[in-house]
Image (cartoon, rainbow, N blue to C red):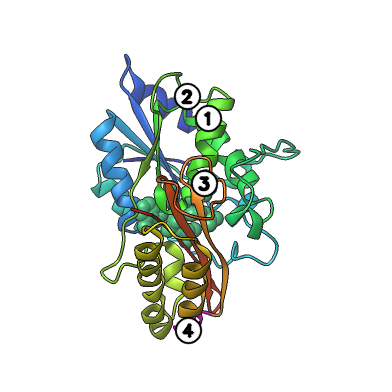
Amino acid sequence: MQTARELEVLRKAVDALRGDGATIALVPTMGALHEGHLTLMREARRTADHVVASIFVNPRQFGEGEDFDAYPRQLARDSELLEKEGVALLWAPQPQEVYPQGYATNISVAGVSEGLCGGDRPGHFDGVATVVCKLFNQVRPDIAFFGEKDWQQLAVIRRMARDLDLTQPHVDAIRGVPIVREKDGLAMSSRNAYLSREQREQAGALPRAMRDAIAVLSEGGEAERPLGNLREVLQVSGFDSVDYAELRDADSLEPLEKDNGNARLFVAARIGGTRLIDNMAVE
Ligand SMILES: Nc1ncnc2c1ncn2[C@@H]1O[C@H](COP(=O)(O)OP(=O)(O)OP(=O)(O)O)[C@@H](O)[C@H]1O
Ligand SMILES: CC(C)(CO)[C@@H](O)C(=O)[O-]
Ligand code: BAL
């Protein structure tokens, strides 16, 4: 596996992979790789001739007081994992390769960026959209893979890709991959590493409480009571606060008062200083 840290090196390496028309899949990450990320790499390998993975802890998507400095960085270990997965090229840009001196452009996707994580983390999805647009322009992939753990992020990227013609029309180029979970149901996340042993045990209450709420929601009643119960369960299970617990349409992300046949439950909750997110279909 080749590693590129400068844009010039990346461009040459991508051209060499592309050759006479091989297809390229991009898997953007912020590193500290776990089985969730590796599942994205495997899906990408199954779909395209070559996989380019990126690792970049993007400062523009972290708000003031968030964990940009603390975010785990382990490039050597991540490189080994990617190599084992058959990734052809790792794009691990120096910050100035993404945001050179005088950088001044921001991409903002209206609608789907609003509410949920966009409400709690102002500017977060502008930072995500901006860096993902840059990564697309740098790598020029045919197809890209993102996890459904960050469902709203996936919706933002799909909207942006359509609006800015980042991918070929009529191609399902932005692929979502189902959430990979730990044995107790907790969604894998690089931020799970912040949890103490006790907090990690308590965190298992999040997917359990969501499943319980979904069992009630799928009967078609109003969401208010099951969502209220979910908040209470999380609080007695050791969570410090619930940022949101909402029922939304899975595609438009419009808020719902009850299941509409395409509903998804979205939760963000804090345990200690760690913010965990999850989402599940109401089926
Ligand atoms: N458990 C998971 N299942 C499926 N995809 C995942 C999972 N965790 C992360 N991903 C996906 O991997 C990609 C890179 O995510 P990222 O590097 O931010 O990791 P993360 O574990 O989500 O970290 P964070 O703690 O920042 O949320 C994103 O598309 C994300 O949705
Ligand atoms: C898509 C992404 C790599 C952009 O920095 C990030 O938001 C992530 O890891 O989900
Ligand atoms: N996986 C989403 C990236 C973030 O929380 O900043």
Q: CA distance from mark 4 to mark 2?
A: 44 Å
Q: Along the polypeptide, which appears first: circle 3 or circle 2?
A: 3
Magenta segment range?
Answer: 235-239
Can you identify the residue that label 2 sits on? 167
Question: What is the secondary structure assignment of the residue under circle 1?
Answer: helix
- Mark 2 surroundings within 10 Å by alpha-carbon count, few (fewer than 14), some (14 through 19), many (20 or more): many
Q: CA distance from mark 3 to mark 2?
A: 17 Å
Q: Does the magenta portion include 236?
A: yes
Q: Position of residue 251 (x, y in %)?
A: 48, 40
Q: Position of residue 121 (x, y in %)?
A: 64, 58
Tell me if residue 41 can be seen.
yes
Q: Along the polypeptide, which appears first: circle 1 or circle 3?
A: 3
Question: What is the secondary structure assignment of the residue under circle 2?
Answer: loop
Q: CA distance from mark 4 to mark 1?
A: 39 Å
Q: Along the polypeptide, which appears first: circle 4 or circle 2?
A: 2
Which mark is drawn over residue 161?
Answer: 1
The outermost residue toward the top is 20
Residue at image location 50% in from the left, 68% down from the top: 227
The residue type indicated by label 2 comes to: Thr
Q: Position of residue 63 (x, y in %)?
A: 67, 59
- Mark 3 surroundings within 10 Å by alpha-carbon count, few (fewer than 14), some (14 through 19), many (20 or more): many
Which mark is drawn over residue 238?
Answer: 4
Residue 130 lies left or right of residue 8; in this view the side is right
Q: Main secondary structure of the magenta part?
A: loop
Can you identify the residue that label 3 sits on? 153
